[in-house]
Image: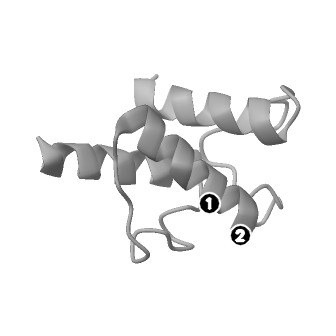
Amino acid sequence: MDHVNEKIREYIVTTWLSGDARGFDDESDLQESGILDSFSTMALVAFLDETFRVHLGAVDVAATTFKSVTTIARLVREKTAHAA
């Protein structure tokens, strides 16, 4: 299990799922399930910035990159690799 995935999943579960991870995994569609809307997306962007020190631009915050824990973690890893 990847540290980045774990942190993102934990944040989502504790913040929007009241700690109940049943039926939720790294491939769950965050938009289709209603977890991510414009408000929660901005909160997640702030969490990623604070936790992983990644600065996301408007082009980074798209339906494809914020589809699941896996796609968000991939974006975080790409951003941190470019910053190093």
Q: Which numbered tag is attached to residue 42?
A: 1
65 vs 73: above or below: below
What percent of the width, then of the height, locates residue 46? 54, 49
Residue 71 vertical position relative to residue 37 in the rendered view, above or below: above
Q: Can residue 18 be seen from the camera position used here?
A: yes
Q: Residue at x 53, y 28 (%)?
A: 7
Could you tell whether 76 is left or right of 6 in the image?
A: left
Q: CA distance from mark 2 to mark 1?
A: 6 Å
Q: Position of residue 74 (x, y in %)?
A: 37, 49
Look at 59% across and 62% down and name the residue there.
67
Q: Amino acid at mark 2?
A: Ser
Q: Nearer the viewer, residue 52 or 73?
A: 52
Q: Say which residue appears at 51% left-offset and 73% top-offset.
A: 62
Quadrant in the rendering for residue 2: top left
Residue 2: in sight, yes or no? no
Query: Horizontal placement of 83 versus 46: left or right?
Result: left
Crowding at label 2, few (<14), some or many (≥20) Cα neighbours within 10 Å? few
- Look at label 1 and name its amino acid: Met
- In what element is the residue under mark 1? helix
Query: Residue 55 appears at what percent x and percent y?
Result: 35, 55
Q: How many marks?
A: 2
Name the outermost residue toward the bottom. Answer: 59
**Local crowd size for mark 1, using a 10 Å CA cut-off: few (<14), some (14–19), many (≥20):** few
**Which labelled disc corresponds to residue 13?**
none
Q: In the rendered image, which quarter contains the C terminus?
A: top left
Q: Nearer the viewer, residue 53 or 80?
A: 53
**According to the image, label 2 marks what residue?**
38
